[in-house]
Image (cartoon, rainbow, N blue to C red):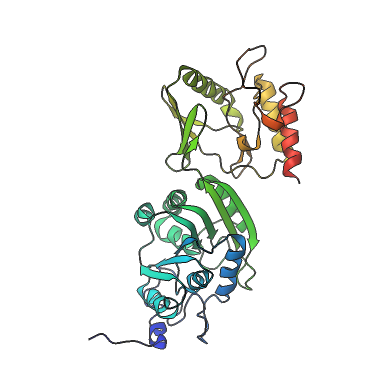
Amino acid sequence: MEVHMGIEDLIARLGTNKAEGSSMAPGVPYQNIPGVPIMAHREHSEVRAATIAEMVPVSGKTILDLGCNVGTISGYLSLLGAEVTGLDHDEHSIAVAKEVHAKNGNANFDVATIDLDLIKSLPHFDIIVWLSQFNWLAKQRGLEYALECLWEIGKHCDTLVFETAGRGDGQASLDYSQEEILNLLCKNTIFRDIQDRGQWNDLWTPRNVFVCQRPLIKHEGFFAETYPGEIGTVLKVYKEWEYSKQTKDRYAMFLKILSPFGVVPQIKAETADTILMSWEGPQARFLPERDLTKILHVLKKADITHRDITPENLTFNGEGIMLLDFSFAVFPNEVTMVSKDLGGKYKCPHGFNDEYSLRKIQQELLR
């Protein structure tokens, strides 16, 4: 016979299945529970949920809350019109979530081990919310494993809202400051737009929240299609046109010439019609003078004119600005066919001038 348990009894069971190394006390939820006057490990979960809703539209969206604990954030987002799935390894936390939140809004909860197999099996979501649990994954399975999960997760959502503990933050195993976590995301996700939105305003441990958007699933270019490879790599597959293969050979040649200088992707492998190269992060949101000067110095030293420097061809890999796409690059006095709109609005009116293009982009990014 099934025995119905009250919320007090369900809460009393929390902490009996806690993660290894967790500082959680028995009977204390990680997130506060609305309407239940009990101290939680982390208060003001509704504030974090409201902040997420301010950062990204949630109404009508499908959302996955990875490591949802007792479901306070999931429940709040569902009340704002989202269809939310909450997953957590702790059956007792999920029992509380179902009791408190599943009756309101549109939130569903389930017990699941959050690992690489689970992430690879996920359907597509509009938004994945991954708060704090990444640190535990790194602590229990190692940072390399956690980063594999982070790389894979971009294949299953349009937007990732991310937070993790870092250096000097409780039981955190990650030796990263909150500012350095941006660099970690740049190198280890397939998102082309990553924003550090600063600290949560929840009167708790100061952690930054990151909004990652526009994952690279497949990019259809004129000469090639681009896909994410294994962690930290991207694959360009050139089309079966003679000129496309010539373009591929020239692209690879320019990368090999410039690779020692640290301003272009590194070739990992190459075939007659593919280039596997290093992933160099999201589109740049800034262009520091030191990086601009370095790129120009390297191009001048190699006697190469890029001719197609646009914002889409500048990325930030967590350390510096990188220059992509040498499909139309030339050496001095080379004559090649180009479209009249090559370089777009960033082309110098008096002919191709890489410094002009970089300066114009720099000014635009400063606005």
Judge by depth and name the residue closer to the eye, 346 or 174.
346
List x then y, in percent, for residue 256: 54, 24
List x then y, in percent, for residue 289: 74, 38
Residue drawn at the location 64% of the way across and 16% of the way down: 331
Judge by depth and name the residue closer to the eye, 264 or 347.
347
Placement of 273 over or under 149, stated as above or below: above
83 with respect to 206 (left or right): left
Placement of 358 over or under 18, stated as above or below: above
List x then y, in percent, for residue 234: 47, 37
Residue drawn at the location 32% of the way across and 87% of the way down: 4
Residue drawn at the location 69% of the way across and 37% of the way down: 291
List x then y, in percent, for residue 297: 70, 27
Q: Using the rendered view, name the quadrant where residue 15 is placed.
A: bottom left
Residue drawn at the location 39% of the way across and 70% of the way down: 109
Q: In which quarter of the image is the N terminus?
A: bottom left
Which residue is most to the left?
A: 1
Total numbered circles? 0
297 with respect to 247 (left or right): right
Placement of 360 over or under 168, stated as above or below: above
